[in-house]
Image (spheres, helix red, strand yellow):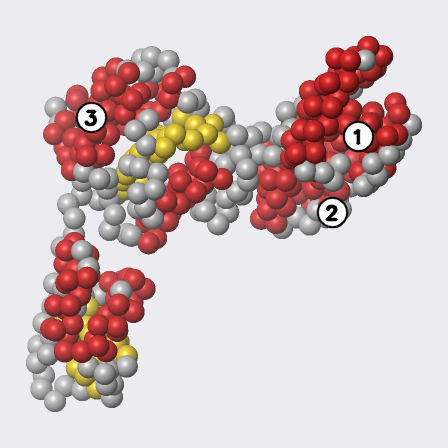
């Protein structure tokens, strides 16, 4: 039989678990008009095999029998309903594949927290790339991934994205996703019910990937740290994957056992910083699009420049703008945008490179547009260099963000800072002028 010989080939090219799970249950029904018909246990099983193994099956079948051009996989109920049954043979139930012991336990996943909806920028590209590798079971980042960041910068988005990707592409994977506090509560509950064996089997033996959020909540909880450390040790030795998140780097966590701290750093440790201006622009556009809110470019720019850090604040601002616009017949104006920003970040002026460039322009009687030009004349170049120097000194904007204001790259900003620093050391009048400007910036 062609299919029997093809299965022998597939057994040699696929892992034992994959073969036993997805190939062995398939049975040949018939070969007709260049098409090999195979029967599987149910339509969900068939959908997964078609998506992941059909091309491989066709390749090996056609090598054995060149007349076979297609392979059709159908579930047993469809096969029985379409069979031409000259004999009323009682249909035989195909066995389902061997299912691994245990099942996934996952906290509620946000439907939009996927890789497709995550805005990648300089501040988070390593963390995002590492999470994609983990979800693809790639060994690039090692067995353990630790992500730390402040609130609202995307830790949960990425862990949700990992869970979405794995559950979509590998539904048989046993994934446990919970917070460190939930892990501690579950452990205490099992201790009280004298059922720690079940707890240990769940996390040691019946887990392929473990996602634990907010590890910092385990501070001072030695027994929970010890138990989680044993879980990490067991999973890592078995070649499983672990992802943890916290608000601080492992070395900065207080009240953490040193052995547990060491285990957490056995793979890649990466952090997510606040998004730069360009990433904030794209976040505002994306959030506005999700809310079906059409914002002019100048309003997108205003929101991106004034709302920094926590991305949830951007979401809050967009929702507020949409709600207010609905009360005004869909109209969005400058006053509305300013009021929303003030309600979220406060009424104080947010000092940024744009404001500093305007201040320097007034001081040197030159327009921002001239500083943004390609002119290298001293009357243009020096104020531009001063504005870049002050922007770096008084804001948290990156070199790339500052350079973008003046249509320059980060290397030009670095050069300008170096030039102005040297001038202030050598020339007292320039030093005094910079001190005066710095005072004016602080008063903005």
Foreground mark, 3 or 2, reads 3
Residue 241, visible in the rendered structure: yes
For residue 230, the mark is 3
For residue 384, the mark is 1
* SS category of the residue bearing label 1: helix
Q: Is 343 left, or right, of 199 in this rendering?
A: right
| Label 1 Cα crowd, 10 Å radius (few <14 / some 14-19 / many 20+) | many
Q: Residue furthest front?
A: 426
Foreground mark, 2 or 1, reads 1
Q: Nearer the viewer, residue 21 or 267?
A: 267
Q: Quadrant of residue 412?
A: top right
Residue lying at 23% horizontally and 34% vertically, measured from the top left: 236
Q: Is 222 left, or right, of 409 in this rendering?
A: left
Q: Nearer the viewer, residue 261 or 431?
A: 431
The residues bearing labels 3 and 2 have C-alpha atoms spaced at a distance of 54 Å
| Label 2 Cα crowd, 10 Å radius (few <14 / some 14-19 / many 20+) | few
Foreground mark, 3 or 1, reads 1
Q: Where's residue 339, x and y in %?
A: 73, 31
Q: Where's residue 319, x and y in %?
A: 62, 40
Q: Earlier in the sequence, mark 2 or mark 1?
A: 2
Q: Quadrant of residue 195?
A: top left
């Amino acid at each position: 039989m062609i299919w029997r010989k093809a299965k022998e080939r597939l057994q040699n090219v696929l892992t034992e678990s994959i073969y036993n799970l997805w190939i062995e249950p398939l049975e040949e029904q018939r070969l007709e008009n260049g098409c090999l018909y195979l029967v599987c246990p149910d339509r969900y099983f068939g959908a997964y095999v078609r998506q992941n193994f059909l091309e491989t099956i066709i390749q090996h079948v056609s090598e054995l029998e060149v007349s076979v051009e297609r392979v059709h996989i159908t579930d047993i109920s469809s096969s029985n309903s379409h069979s031409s049954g000259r004999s009323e043979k009682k249909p035989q139930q195909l066995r389902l594949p061997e299912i691994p012991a245990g099942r996934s336990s996952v906290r509620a996943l946000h439907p939009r927290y996927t890789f497709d909806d995550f805005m990648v920028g300089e501040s988070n590209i390593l963390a995002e790339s590492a999470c994609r590798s983990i979800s693809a079971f790639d060994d690039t980042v090692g067995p353990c991934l630790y992500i730390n960041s402040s609130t609202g910068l995307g830790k949960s988005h990425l862990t949700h994205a990992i869970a979405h990707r794995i559950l979509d592409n590998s539904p048989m994977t046993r994934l446990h996703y919970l917070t460190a506090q939930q892990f501690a509560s579950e452990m205490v509950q099992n201790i009280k019910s004298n059922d720690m064996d079940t707890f240990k089997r769940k996390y040691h033996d019946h887990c392929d990937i473990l996602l634990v959020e907010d590890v910092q909540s385990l501070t001072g909880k030695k027994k929970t740290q010890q138990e989680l450390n044993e879980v990490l040790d067991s999973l890592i030795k078995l070649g499983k994957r672990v992802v943890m998140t916290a608000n601080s780097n492992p070395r900065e966590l207080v009240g953490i056992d040193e052995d547990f701290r060491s285990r957490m750093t056995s793979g890649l440790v990466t952090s997510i910083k606040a998004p730069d201006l360009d990433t904030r622009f794209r976040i505002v556009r994306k959030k506005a699009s999700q809310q079906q809110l059409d914002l002019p470019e100048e309003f997108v720019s205003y929101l991106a420049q004034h709302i920094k850090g926590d991305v949830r604040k951007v979401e809050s601002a967009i929702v507020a703008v949409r709600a207010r616009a609905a009360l005004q017949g869909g109209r969005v104006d400058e006053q509305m945008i300013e009021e929303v920003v003030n309600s979220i970040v406060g009424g104080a002026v947010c000092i940024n490179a744009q404001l500093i460039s305007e201040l320097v322009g007034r001081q040197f009687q030159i327009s921002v547009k001239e500083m943004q030009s390609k002119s290298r004349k001293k009357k243009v170049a020096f104020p531009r260099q001063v504005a870049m120097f002050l922007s770096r000194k008084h804001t948290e904007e990156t070199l790339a963000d500052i350079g973008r204001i003046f249509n320059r790259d980060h290397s030009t900003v670095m050069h300008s800072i170096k030039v102005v620093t040297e001038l202030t050391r050598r020339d007292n009048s320039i030093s005094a002028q910079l001190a005066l400007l710095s005072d004016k910036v602080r008063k903005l």
